[in-house]
Image (cartoon, rainbow, N blue to C red):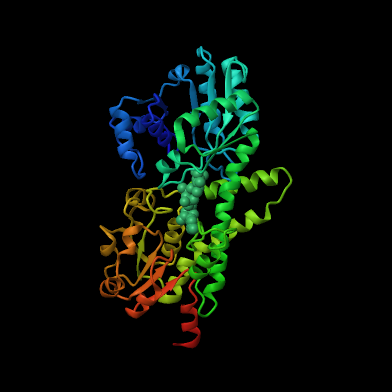
């Protein structure tokens, strides 16, 4: 019942399916039983409420309930191990428990692997465990498909209801047809293209998708670094211009402090580790990761350049979550930025519309937690915008100028108009903006 499973559960319930959510976390189940969303995601609270009201959704720790299902999704986490390779512990455990529940199942249940797993996992890990535990044979006693998920946090419900495409993998043609029919009935007229393929193609597609998106962001961030050292250059204009080339497209070209979250960092690392294990050095993917690491370091560097010494300076951080519209701090760039600034002796105050509770958990009393964005910038020597929450876009340059002790603003996500900020007397620096460099070089 995590960020994929619960979203699917409430969407399926909304479409009239009877859904049982299984999770070993009793605290989470307690929340669900009171229709409380365990994490923030737009519209989740409403969907969850509706699912509970309609009595189409129940949650339990009891895997035995699974024997009654026609269709079972495995949507457990696949975290990274210390060496960044993929940890399949939860997948194996879920497969074992599902396999056991299948012993008593009278129907041919369709088991669907949603969790992000490396090529070969459904065939070589999930299938044998299900067969051993159930005493049944895949394709006869039960069916198995891979079906990677492409939903984005912050847009998860929309993405679940209106996916760009659906990819289903299996070595069993009837399993592919069965899952295709489920989606045809779920999406009705808005059903997207459905690609039916091998387990391995479906599994690798998921990694390729995330790796390509991360590559696009790291690419534009590389151009941003060049623009920063080029007088009169601005990566925003360049991104807009290349985005109009239909072969490139405008999305995922927002330069900034880099990508984070629970997916890109983990999935790219797992892809590198997998690729190396089969004798192929994925040079490009390694460069994409290295570029991203470098990108996050720029926040502290820009602050240092603007302030000189960071020790004892009051720095305001606006935005902590790895992207807007989520409370998720997993692999958020804000964490490495805060750690770097703390190492340099800066005094930090932070504000995020959703991620404050999690931030307190991580940083304790090492930093100050503001009550709102304006309170955060009050009397600050420097403000670093880390996550582009919509509410930050409405803060006027004059407000920064009036409230801050030294009006130095570092726009880590390119949401502000540099000219307006400079005109308001603010020392404005931004990812991919060459102006500051020109000014420093020429002394103007
Ligand atoms: C990503 C994929 O977009 C989903 O398709 C996929 O299902 C999901 O991973 C997953 O594997 O579960 P998500 O991690 O929710 O979704 O977030 P994205 O919207 O992809 O953003 C990832 C990171 O890239 C964020 O830190 C964001 O700030 C950054 N980003 C994105 C940029 O810096 N610039 C951009 O132009 C776009």
- Please state if 338 lies on the left or on the right of 34 as rendered: right
Does residue 118 appear in this view?
no
Q: Which of 89 and 135 is in front in this view?
A: 135
Quadrant of the frame with the C terminus: bottom left
Q: Quadrant of residue 393?
A: bottom left
Quadrant of the frame with the N terminus: top left
Counting from the top left corner in percent of width and height, residue 152 is at: 46, 46
Question: Compared to 174, does 276 lie above or below?
Answer: below
Q: Which of 375 and 180 is in front in this view?
A: 180
Which residue is pictured at 26% across the width and 74% down the height?
402
Question: Compared to 357, does 390 lie above or below?
Answer: below
Which residue is outermost to the bottom?
Answer: 443
- Please state if 277 lies on the left or on the right of 299 as rendered: right
Which residue is pictured at 54% across the width and 76% down the height?
229
Which residue is pictured at 49% across the width and 24% down the height?
71
Q: Nearer the viewer, residue 415 or 353?
A: 415
Which residue is pictured at 68% across the width and 55% down the height?
283
Counting from the top left corner in percent of width and height, residue 58 is at: 35, 25
Does residue 171 appear in this view?
yes
Counting from the top left corner in percent of width and height, residue 171 is at: 65, 27
Counting from the top left corner in percent of width and height, residue 76 is at: 49, 34
Q: Quadrant of residue 120?
A: top right
Total residue callouts: 0
Which residue is outermost to the front?
Answer: 189
Q: Quadrant of residue 315?
A: bottom left
């Amino acid at each position: 019942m995590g960020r994929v499973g619960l979203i699917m559960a409430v969407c399926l319930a909304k479409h009239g399916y009877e859904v049982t959510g299984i999770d070993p976390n009793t605290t989470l189940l307690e929340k669900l039983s009171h229709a409380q969303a365990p994490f923030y995601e737009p519209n989740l609270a409403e969907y969850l409420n509706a699912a509970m009201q309609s009595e189409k959704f129940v949650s339990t720790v009891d895997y035995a309930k699974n024997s009654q299902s026609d269709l079972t999704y495995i949507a457990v986490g696949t975290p990274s191990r210390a060496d960044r390779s993929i940890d399949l512990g939860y997948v194996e455990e879920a497969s074992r428990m599902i396999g056991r529940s299948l012993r008593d199942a009278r129907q041919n249940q369709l088991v669907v692997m949603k969790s992000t797993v490396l090529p070969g996992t459904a065939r070589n890990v999930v299938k044998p465990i299900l067969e051993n535990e159930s005493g049944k044979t895949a394709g006869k006693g039960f069916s198995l498909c891979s079906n990677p998920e492409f939903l984005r946090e912050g847009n998860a419900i929309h993405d679940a209801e209106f996916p760009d495409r659906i990819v289903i993998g299996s070595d069993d043609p009837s399993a592919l047809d069965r899952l295709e029919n489920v989606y045809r009935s779920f999406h009705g007229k808005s059903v997207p293209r459905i690609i039916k393929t091998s387990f391995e193609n479906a599994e690798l597609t998921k990694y390729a998708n995330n790796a390509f998106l991360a590559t696009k962001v790291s690419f534009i961030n590389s151009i941003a670094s060049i623009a920063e050292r080029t007088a009169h250059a601005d990566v925003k204009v360049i991104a807009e211009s290349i985005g109009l080339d239909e072969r490139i497209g405008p999305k995922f070209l927002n330069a900034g402090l880099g990508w984070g979250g629970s997916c890109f960092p983990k999935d790219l690392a797992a892809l590198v580790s997998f690729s190396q294990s089969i004798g192929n050095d994925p040079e490009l993917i390694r460069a994409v990761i290295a570029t991203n690491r470098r990108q996050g370091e720029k926040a502290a560097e820009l602050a240092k350049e603007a302030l000189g010494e960071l020790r004892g300076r009051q720095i305001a951080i606006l935005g902590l979550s790895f992207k807007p519209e989520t409370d998720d701090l997993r692999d958020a760039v804000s964490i490495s930025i805060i750690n770097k600034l703390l190492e340099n002796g800066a005094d930090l105050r932070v504000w995020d519309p959703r991620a404050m509770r999690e931030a307190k958990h991580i940083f304790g009393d090492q930093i100050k937690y503001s009550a709102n964005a304006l309170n955060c910038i009050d009397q600050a020597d420097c403000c670093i915008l880390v996550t582009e929450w919509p509410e930050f876009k409405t803060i006027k340059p004059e407000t920064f100028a009036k409230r801050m002790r030294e009006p130095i603003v570092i726009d880590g996500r390119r949401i502000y108009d540099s000219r307006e900020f400079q005109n308001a007397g603010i020392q404005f620096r931004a990812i991919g903006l060459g102006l500051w460099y020109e000014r420093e070089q020429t002394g103007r």
